[in-house]
Image: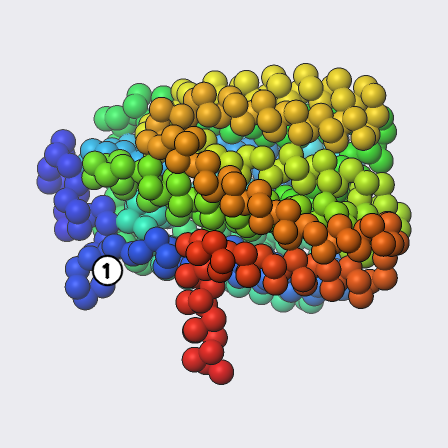
Amino acid sequence: MSWKRSRDGPVPAARVSFQLNPSGTAVVSIRKSLAWSFSQSAGQKLIQFVGSIFVARLLTPDEVGVFSIAMAMNYLLGSFREFGAVNYLIREPNLTPDKIRTAFAIMIVIQWSLGGLLLAVRSFLAEFYGEPGIADVLTVVALGFFISPFGQPAIGLLRRAMRFDLLHHISIFGVVVGTTTTIVLAFLDFSYMALAWGVLAGNVVRSVLPLCVQRDHLMLVPGFSHWREILSFGGFLALAGICGTSASDGRKFILGAFISPAAIALVERAEQIPRTSREALFLPIGRVLLSSFSKDIREGRSIGPSVEAYVGALTIVTWPAFAALSALAVPVIVLLFGENWRVAGEILPFLLLAAGLPSALPQPEQILISHGAVRRLFVLRLCQLVVAIAVSTVGAYYGLVAFAVSQILIAAVLLGIVYFFIGDLMETSLTRLLPSYIHAAGLSVVCASPPAMVYWQYGDGPPVSWVLGALALSAASWIGGIMLLRHPLSLEVRHLWGRVAQRL
């Protein structure tokens, strides 16, 4: 297959969607895509968790601290890494070979520049923190910026074709190689450099394997014919990401300034439960839906039914779970993290409510990027930044509990802002989403009842057995509820149970 033909014409389906199976089609169902995406996230977290257990016994906190300081700079620059080029490849309706080459060229320019910047500031950062090892770590980590652009166009096109099975294998193998490299080198007394070489090894795998899948990209030549279009798309996307990150991380400075550094730790500990839950759901689903929505829009299909199914599934899962946890927030926090974090449990119900509200609508990135409306996304995230900083400042002024309550107000206002920006692009209405809200709210009351009864009987100090029993009863109530409602998720539960029964 030559990239020299059809310079300005659309890329044939085989070139974009990778006809990798015998039947010549790369179409993968949404159910299978979600399964692979969830498996990828769960597998990564499990492998990294197991690896962290070994690393904790082989490296000292000081050694890990040197690596963490260096990686903080890497993560900061990493927000500019793709510069929206991968998302451009996913959603571009009229994708041509020249556009793919231009995206590749922009990835090279951006990431090589960032890698060069890391190399330039490594000595300064090492001197500033008084840790010479920081420079050594940054030297190795910077190499990843020079390697990763070569595999990213293939990754973008795999996501466009919804080949999440291949992306799963690539990602898991990369994590296994990176984690294994870190453990082996730590055992061989490479100190903090074991972590750095592990990161680089993972990056190499995730860059090379996509090229093995799509070998045409081994000969892909950079070009700049569509650079204005891609830079405009990626620029607004990068600015939106900066605003979103600033809105989230800016609260830490506010808490530290108005209350104390301990308040930051308490809020982060309380948010760990809803954040982990949302990451476990939003990230895997978001990867699939961005590709799915983009594909539907390119092919002239409405995304309305998919939006309704997404909101129905997300609300029926998050709202009852967060409601059940709210009733036993303090006992759960104390059980998981110890008595020192009791205050985190006292503010957890407010933060759970704030975390549950966004589930009422799709993530704006999924809708706006799919439609190419990246300017809207930037303005939306800018509004979020202003609201979050202003309201959080007022809340922090009156104390930690007031700050936690202020997050509910922020979530409610942001929900209205999100609907304002994406309402005309969802291709559905709030009226059609209302049944999902009613079902989720009703099931939340049912699932919260057992924990609420335990709290009414024992207050903040119930026996552990009662806490676990109440949460188990809530889970059983949720399963029974979706069955009675004949919610679409009940079909997935039956399907999963059938698979388990067959294996047994």
Residue that extends furthest to the bottom in the rendered view of this protein: 504
Q: Amino acid at mark 1?
A: Leu
Depicted 101 relative to depicted 137: above or below: above
Depicted 23 relative to depicted 415: above or below: below
Q: Is residue 307 left or right of residue 243?
A: left
Of residues 150 and 14, which is closer to you in this image?
A: 14
Q: Residues within 10 Å of mark 1 (few under 14, many from 20)?
A: few
Of residues 246 and 315, which is closer to you in this image?
A: 315
Q: Is residue 363 left or right of residue 229?
A: right
Depicted 200 relative to depicted 497: above or below: above
Question: Measured from the top left, where is residue 464 in percent x and y?
Answer: 82, 62
Residue in view at x 85 percent, y 57 percent: 462
Residue tagged by mark 1? 20
Residue in view at x 33 percent, y 31 percent: 427
Question: Measured from the top left, where is residue 111 in percent x and y?
Answer: 45, 35
Residue in view at x 68 percent, y 29 percent: 407
Question: Measured from the top left, where is residue 101 in percent x and y?
Answer: 26, 36
State whether residue 495 appears in this view: yes
Of residues 224 and 396, which is closer to you in this image?
A: 396
Question: Measured from the top left, where is residue 349 in percent x and y?
Answer: 73, 40
State whether residue 89 appears in this view: no
Residue that extends furthest to the front in the rendered view of this protein: 484
